Amino acid sequence: MSDISLFVADAHCRGHLAGRDHPERPERFDAVKHGMERAGLVARMRRAGPRIATEDEVLLCHTPHYLKTAQHDIDSGVPFLSTGDTEITTSSWDVALRAVGGALSAVDAVATGAARNAFCLLRPPGHHANASHGMGFCIFNNIAIAARYAQRAHGMARIMIVDWDVHHGNGTQDIFYQDPSVFFFSTHQWPLYPGTGRADETGEGAGEGATMNFPFPAGAGRKEILGAVQDRLLPAAANFRPDLVLISAGFDSRIGDPLGRFTLEDEDFADLTHAVMGITDGRVVSMLEGGYNLAGLGSASAAHVEALIDG
């Protein structure tokens, strides 16, 4: 297996919501990239070229009706998806397909051993989108599609998704709630949008026990979140034995974010990353979710990526 870390970033992703006064703005892309460049990280990584996901790939997790609805909404020039609270512009369809495509390129590289791990600078984010609805700034669920793609294209039987965004990844949970082959672990602020992710939400049917939620109050930080990872996730992972770990890397759980009230520091993201990498000997694909304080987003994502590179 290669010891190279892959950096996936498509500048076309800046086109989504360009010119809008919105928290999930194109400047987020710049903040992450510049933070990585200042830390000298981009030069230490291999870059992946752009890739546009096919509709068949998106259909791994979304319904045909939703795809038609989302494309119609975007092509019509309306400002919001009709399915939920996601602003759109006429470039959003292409950008969303590119975000999914970038995630799948990263899975290909890690699954084949061309890279040890990968960080995907994606927007729009994805973890609130479920099979039939885009919502919460999300159009397609990038990480869910990547998980199913890893199974279908690369024969990976068990996928673990770790979500440390300050908001619960309700869409990811919904998609895999009855599926024992994808383990979903989330730490998130409670109460907060979208109002899901209670501790007693643990899966359903065959998927019972494959969902693990840790809702924490405002003000929670390293003790609670890293503690949940070390004390609960790692033993669960040892039992589940995933073939691949995917991270919904939301940096709105950092102190000072305008949309959350967690208190993680940059070094906490590095320690979270090291802990998660130990599950599969560093075989990890990380994807950007939230993070809306631009300075904090840049520094926290750089700390996360440096941990990926250094192992």
Image: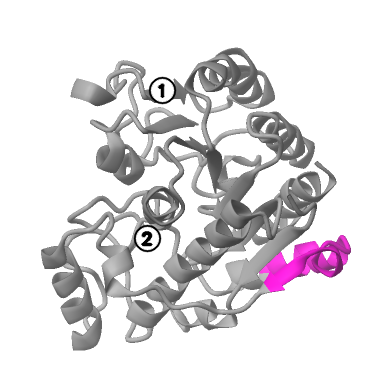
Quadrant, the C terminus: top right
User: In front here: 261 or 93?
Assistant: 93
Specify few, some or many for label 2: CA neighbours under 10 Å numbering under 14, 14-19, or 20 or more.
Answer: many
Mark yes or no: residue 204 visible: no
Mark linked to residue 137: 2
Q: CA distance from mark 2 to mark 1?
A: 24 Å
Residue furthest left in the image: 65
Q: Give the extent of the magenta segment.
A: 31-47
Tag 2's secondary structure?
loop
Q: Could you say which disc has been placed on residue 212 in the image?
A: 1
**In terms of secondary structure, what is the magenta stretch mainly?**
helix
**Residue 227: x %, y % from top left:** 63, 17
**Dot 1 alpha-carbon crowd within 10 angstroms: few under 14, some 14 to 19, many 20 or more:** many
What mark, if any, has residue 108 been given in the picture? none
Q: Is residue 232 visible?
A: yes
Residue at left 36%, top 52%?
Answer: 152
